[in-house]
Image (spheres, grey):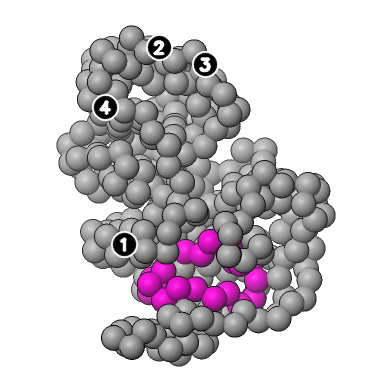
Amino acid sequence: MQFIDFEEGTAADTLFVNDTTKPTLKQGQVLVKVHSFGINRADTLQRQGKYPAPRGESSILGLEVSGEVVEIAEAEETTASRWQLGDKVFALVAGGGYAQYVAVNASHLMPKPKNVDMPSAAGIAEVFLTAYQSLFQVGGLKSGQRVLIHAGASAVGLAAIQLAKADGCHVSVTASSEKKLAECEKYGADRLINYKTQNFAECFEQGGVDVIIDFVAGDYVNRNLKVLNNDGKIVYLAMLAGRFADKLDMALMLSKRATITGSTLRSRSDEYKSSLISDFCQKFFADLESGALRPVIDTQYSINEIGLTHERLERNDTMGKLVVSWE
């Protein structure tokens, strides 16, 4: 099979197509012929040598795919596989997505929604599961509460906006341009903040927020605390402003009984991911089927344009998901 290869520490335009053998299935796995795969910031960091694949996982890039089931390994003795050859699916993987075939734990597959095409389905798993985990399981967001989502026009941000609105929450977002804010508003955002021209900490005179989803850190930490309601939570998913934050205002954190926590998805256990996928599907899969929730695809690319996808992500030049198709 073909896959997208890289030399660690090199530039985006050095990504290249290479050949390797198809994955060998383990018990409880399914082989998916990949139609399309999503591009994530974790992929660019792995290429740069800053985010290696978890131990035991494929070193091939790629965390989410869409495609067709072409082989099914034996399930555990007490469990019959729910999947059949030819099933159209999308999946979360810990590595191996940038390839024509990928081995996936059967419990990490989801059926492709009827109203979503294959390229768009490749942009669901990583962003919607990350957003769901961050908002509800880590952030503890409850129906009717208020949430602030930084990088609102990112793929995860746009998924988070939709999930929070589907649960009846008030959503504030930050983004770097009026064009990106308009995209956030299109998917339900209530309060739009251009962080290039506004200090978001000064935009909440009439009450704060209960949960904050942040990818920035740095000088956002204390400003987040200022707009957080008592007993609120700040969930960090990345550190675009660098690994070290500004001086934490402990007095402000204590007075608000704030919780500051970090979260990742890729390094979680298979059991955790299976439970997360089950919970997400139980609550929101019907909304994906009906079109009430939609993957937001910025651009679909071909394999020979793979370098451009990494370049765009590194320039922060996207609104929604970049996907690449083999066909």
Q: Quadrant of the C terminus?
A: bottom right
Which quarter of the picture shows residue 152? Answer: top left
Amino acid carrying mark 3 in the image: Asp
First in sequence: mark 4 vs mark 3: 4
* Start-end of magenta stretch: 92-111
Q: CA distance from mark 3 to mark 1?
A: 35 Å
Q: Nearer the viewer, residue 262 or 120?
A: 262
Q: Which mark is residue 87?
A: none
Rounded to the nearest angstrom, the CA distance separating label 1 from label 2 is 36 Å
Q: What's the residue type where badge 2 is placed?
A: Asp
- Residue type marked 1: Ser
The 10 Å Cα crowd at callout 3, few under 14, some 14 to 19, many 20 or more, is few
Location of mark 2 (residue): 249
Q: Quadrant of residue 191?
A: top left
17 or 113, which is in the foreground? 17
Outermost residue toward the top in this view: 251
Q: CA distance from mark 4 to mark 3?
A: 20 Å
Q: CA distance from mark 3 to mark 2?
A: 9 Å
Marks 4/1: CA distance? 25 Å
Rendered image: mark on residue 246:
3
Give 248 or 227, whichever is nearer the viewer. 248
Q: CA distance from mark 4 to mark 2?
A: 15 Å
Where residue 69 sits: x, y (%)?
48, 83
Left or right of residue 273, residue 312 in this image: right
Q: Which residue is mark 1?
A: 275
Camera-near label (4 vs 1) is 1
